[in-house]
Amino acid sequence: MARTLKEKVIDQFITGYVINECYNTYNVTFLSETKLQKLIFLSERKLISQRIKALNYSYLAYKSGPFSFEVRHDFEKYKLIENIDDQYINSIDNINKIIDDFSDILKRNDEIINRIDRVLKQYAFLDLDELLERVYNLSYKGRKIRYIKLKTPLLFKLNEDNSSKILDITEEELDDLSLCLDPNVAIQLEPAFEDMRRGRVLSFEKISRQI
C-alpha cells in the first residue's frame, strides 16, 4: 500500500534524525546509503514488533540485504538539501537545523525516539561488513534473511488500526516540515528561518516573497 503524504514527511523527518544522530553521536561522518538502509530497517522492524506506527517504509530482500527504494529516495533528497555531490552524506549543517527547528516533535514522541536511539546504540557504531552480517542473520518467518528469495517483501507499514501507538505530529508541523524537506524551497526559505531562530520573525507576506 502506498504511503500517504503524512507518512512520507514523517519518514523523511525520522530518517533525518537518524542521519543526524549517526554524525553527531556515533561519529559516522561518511554515511553510506547501504548503512542508512540497514539502520532504518532495524529501527522500523523494532517499532513494528511493538506495534508502534512511526516509520512507514517498504523493504524487499536484495543482494545487499533489506532494501527500500523509498529510503534511497530520501537519502538522495538529503544529499540535495546538504548540496552533496558524493556517494556519502558527509555534512549535516542543514539537516541539523531541521532537526533542531522541529525538536518539539522529538520531545513529544520521546518514547518512540528512545526506541530508535536504542537501535542506533546497538548498531550505528558497527562497520558496514559487521552490520550487514548482523542483518543477514536476522530471522524472517523462520529463515535467516540471507536465504530469503530476492525481492521478497520483508517489511511494510503498519496500519493505524493495528497500532498501539502512533507518532504524534500536528498538521501545522507537517506543513512546515514539507517546506523544509523540499530541497528547492528549503534553500529559498533559509534566510527567513534563520531570522526566526534569532528572534527576528518575519511576517507571512515577507516569507512568501522569498519562495
Image (tube, helix red, strand yellow):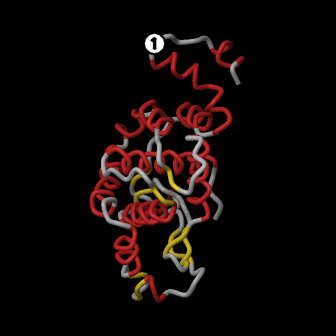
Tell me if residue 16 comes above or below residue 161 in the rendering: above
Q: Residue at x 40, y 33 (%)?
A: 104
Residue 118 drawn at (x, y percent): 28, 57
Identify the image quadrant of residue 20.
top left
In this picture, residue 114 sits left or right of residue 129: left
Tell me if residue 183 comes above or below residue 59 in the rendering: above
Residue 19 drawn at (x, y percent): 44, 49
Identify the image quadrant of residue 44.
bottom left
Q: Residue at x 58, y 19 (%)?
A: 192
Q: Residue at x 44, y 59 (%)?
A: 163
The quarter of the picture where the C terminus appears is top right
In this picture, residue 203 sits left or right of residue 208: left
Q: Residue at x 55, y 78 (%)?
A: 62
In this picture, residue 50 sits left or right of residue 54: left
Q: Residue furthest front?
A: 86
Residue 25 drawn at (x, y percent): 30, 47
Tell me if residue 66 comes above or below residue 171 in the rendering: below
Residue indicated by mark 1: 199
Label 1 environment density (alpha carbons within 10 Å; few <14, some 14–19, many ≥20) = few
What residue type is disc 1 on? Gly
Q: Nearer the viewer, residue 99 or 173?
A: 99
Identify the image quadrant of residue 205.
top right
Q: Nearer the viewer, residue 83 or 10?
A: 83
Question: Which element carries disc 1, helix, strand or loop?
Answer: loop
